Image: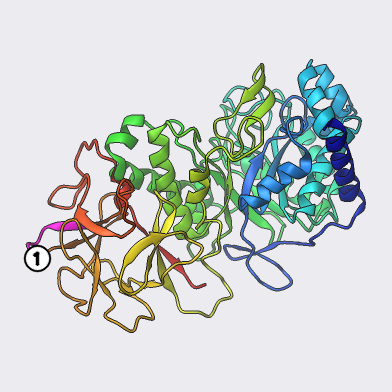
Amino acid sequence: MKTHVQNLSLTFLIIILTATTVHSLTLSTSSRWIVSPATGDRYKLRCVNWVGHLHTMVPEGLHKQPLNAIASHISSTGFNCVRLTWPTYMFTRPNYSSLTVAQSLDQWSLGSAKAGMARNNPSLLDVGVWDAQKAVIDGLGAMDIMVVLDNHVSLPKWCCGGDDGNGFFGDEFFEPGEWLQGLTAVATRYLGNPTVVGMSMRNELRGPRQNPNDWYKYMQQGAEAIHRANPDVLVIVSGLSFDTNLGFLKNRPLEANVTNKLVYEAHWYSFGNPTEKWLYQTNGYCGNVTQWFLGQSGFLSSGPSPFPLFLSEFGLDQTGGNEAQNRYLGCLLGLVAERDLDWAWWALQGSYMLREGKVDAGEDYGVLDFNWESVRNSSILKKLQLIQQITQDPKSNNPSYQIMYHPQSGQCVQSNQHLVYLANCQNWSRWSYDKNGGPIKLMDSTTPSCLYAAGDGLPVVFSDDCSGQQSVWTLVSGSKFHIAAKDKQGSLLCLDWDSSSSGISIVTKKCLCLGNDARDVPMCVENPQRQWFKFVPSNK
């Protein structure tokens, strides 16, 4: 078995180091979209984060599985891109850059990881850490997976703390000149490599030194340094406060000479959110945090002069036990789907060689399990199926319509003109909903096409009555995810899908966590997300 794995790994490494990369792709920006400059076709980043910035400077998991197996997992789970992290010192300081993979593992006494590398990727053991990174990039390219290189830290270590010395320009390990040197080195190294389509200048700027004036100064220098060295790649710009704040751009734009290459990035986690807010005030709190995100970062993707916005980190505990995080994810997915944002899930890795002093540490946020053998939680990936697709095409001349998306299940509302039900989002029905307080019509229907609230607990049906109170639908609750109409008695009913039932049909039921006035109640122990539906605009 050992010989077989070694031969496979050696063969794969030879292929990726000597063959022409499978795809050739240079990306640019047009308004708020990332596009091919040759055709103008939109290209959506649907990425997963893969850590390579920790102590060893070797991408995690190579001691657990062969590189080609990991790349295959990434492709088969619907990702077309990896946000691959790297530390500055790996490219600026000889005592880091001169190490081979074996020497780096030995330096941290990682004998078990070294033995695993010898079994799974033996050809990488004696190459330098630079070459190991390139082998990973070329291995991903061989599977037609793009790479965004993210400068995560300077000193190789776990990120991120407010006082870890890696947070902002002038911190102990974050000297601006050396940072520019590292960006230039990496941009130069991957000039002409079509797999590397973008470079993120710095992850999660933070700490007591952070301020907008230095941000403008150094982000302009960093963007232009990358662009001079490698004019092909997208230049991705992060914000302040752990990449949650770009609000200062409302008053003053970033002036950087990187025409049609500038992308902004943001992060959105539930860290710091009060658990009780998500559990007992789910509707209103979702509305509040959504408005916070739009005010801090999301505004960049709309307005008269929009930019592409890359949600480069979001995620949750995939063991499934954190109910507050589960509700956060449904809230976030509604906005990501509505805006059709580019994104990167945190994270790929199911474990680490060494993290914060712990050898062979597990990662509950990882798509893959501890041994990198299989998907940890397939239900999470199911929730991503709509946002893994392009729903808004800047070149399309098709009329606009709405997709009805159910974030909790990850499914879309479909109809066969008789039954209204949830099914996977590989296909969807096209709906018309022109205004809040109007009818919901099934487009291209040859029969009565307006959704009709037949009664509490009954399946929603179609009617040719498109103006009565049972066919007039309003977005209610603080989340704006509840879609409600009134029954014959004037009582408010919401679209509902109960996963505990054996049926797949959409029904109408009493609105969860809302009073008779259609406002959120102050405290609710029920989970309203089974009644959350989002209108997602599309022209595909």
Dividing the picture into quadrants, the one containing residue 419 is bottom left
Residue 320 within the magenta-colored segment of the rendering:
no
User: Residue shown at 60%/35% (left/top)?
Assistant: 205
Q: Quick one: label 1, few (<14), some, or many (20+) residues within 10 Å?
A: few
Q: Position of residue 117 (x, y in %)?
A: 81, 29
**Closest to the observer, 517 or 58:** 58
**Residue annotated with mark 1:** 488
- Hey, which quadrant is residue 126 in on the image? top right
Question: Exactly how many numbered labels are in the figure?
Answer: 1
Residue 491 magenta: yes
Percent across and percent down for residue 521 are: 19, 42
Query: Which residue is at the far front?
Result: 1
Q: How is the image coloured?
A: rainbow
Front residue of 210/283: it is: 283
Q: Amino acid at mark 1?
A: Lys
Q: Quadrant of the N terminus?
A: top right
Task: Name the image quarter holding residue 362.
Answer: top right
Q: Secondary structure at mark 1?
A: loop
Instruction: Please state which of residues 177 and 120 is positioned toward the viewer in this rendering.
Output: 120
Q: Which residues are magenta?
A: 489-494
Question: Of all residues shown, which one is farthest toward the left?
Answer: 489
Q: Is residue 198 visible?
A: no
